[in-house]
Amino acid sequence: MTRLDNLENARSIPAVMEGLWRRTGIWFELVRNLAVRDVETRYKHSILGIYWAIINPLISSAIYGFVFGLIFHATSKPIPYVVFLLTNLTFWNLFANGIMSATTSVSGNAALLAKIYFPRVVLPTASVAARLIDFLFSLLVLFVFIGIYRVPIHWQVVFLPVILVVQLIFTLGIAYLVAALNVLYRDMGQLIGLILMIWIYLSPVMYQVSKAPEHIRRLLLLNPMGAVIEGERNLLFTGHLLHPHYLDLAAGLAILTWTVGWYVFHRIEPLFAEVM
């Protein structure tokens, strides 16, 4: 390779980086616009609108609190049970609602897909991103309850976004998978709803992992969402992780799930136009 070739290659690197940066910006802008559109469509003709994002976790917490707190006498000392439950549901709902929304994100936008071309993977990504808006409102309610019950928050909460990223990667992986499969098999919505209904009881949402027998505790923490929710709550209220090795495993499984979901989505994508 001549000196002139080296000089031309060196000049082309900034151009390549600029093009990559521009495409990435367009991709994120598309995700943002579709996420906003998703939220507007969801609450457009409702009476309470975005306030449903606050009401839903409150009603869920009241129901689960009545069943597990008053009837089964579940405890979460030293954290008040209502704060314990609302914390877990806030993070769980981000996961569950993201997957449920993503399931029909492709099959429910057939008209949009017929009009213009854009990367189809943006649709389930935007569906999960839209649930982040609901999550922020739920988080606001959670901090109100934390203030009412005067539960101390440790400074290590600044690291909470790291665990949240693991949760989002895991959520996106499943979202890509179910969004693609739902194009081929339209009963995926019912199946996912059933799986999530079982999954919430296999995750430490209504109960503490420490209350379970040792062998069951390990199984609960091998569940990525079990390790993630446990880590998020512990970081928030104790300032340290009680089971960091299970969280490391959850991060590995999240990356694996995202990779598999991305691969399956792009393998099935050529069939979207034919099926829809």
Image (cartoon, rainbow, N blue to C red):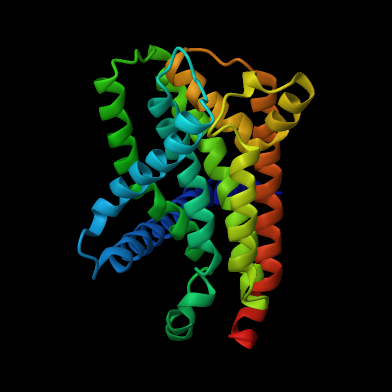
The number of callouts visible is 0
Single out the residue that lies furthest toward the left. 47
Q: Is residue 148 above or below residue 273?
A: above
Q: Is residue 36 above or below residue 134?
A: below
Q: Does residue 173 appear in the picture of this structure?
A: no
Foreground residue, 49 or 239? 49
Residue appearing at x 50%, y 33% in the figure: 71
Q: Is residue 272 above or below residue 55?
A: below
Indicate the position of residue 18 as horizontal and vertical percent values. 44, 51
Single out the residue that lies furthest toward the right. 215
Indicate the position of residue 196 as horizontal and vertical percent values. 60, 52
Task: Locate the C terminus and report the quarter of the image it occupies.
Answer: bottom right
Residue appearing at x 75%, y 25% in the figure: 218
Q: Does residue 94 appear in the picture of this structure?
A: yes
Residue appearing at x 20%, y 64% in the figure: 47
Indicate the position of residue 51 as horizontal and vertical percent values. 24, 51
Q: Which quadrant would residue 89 be assigned to in this image?
A: top left
82 displayed left or right of 265: left
Q: Which quadrant would residue 28 be assigned to in this image?
A: bottom left
Residue appearing at x 68%, y 29% in the figure: 221
Foreground residue, 225 or 120? 225
22 displayed left or right of 205: left
Indicate the position of residue 1 as horizontal and vertical percent values. 71, 49
Single out the residue that lies furthest toward the front. 71
207 displayed left or right of 43: right
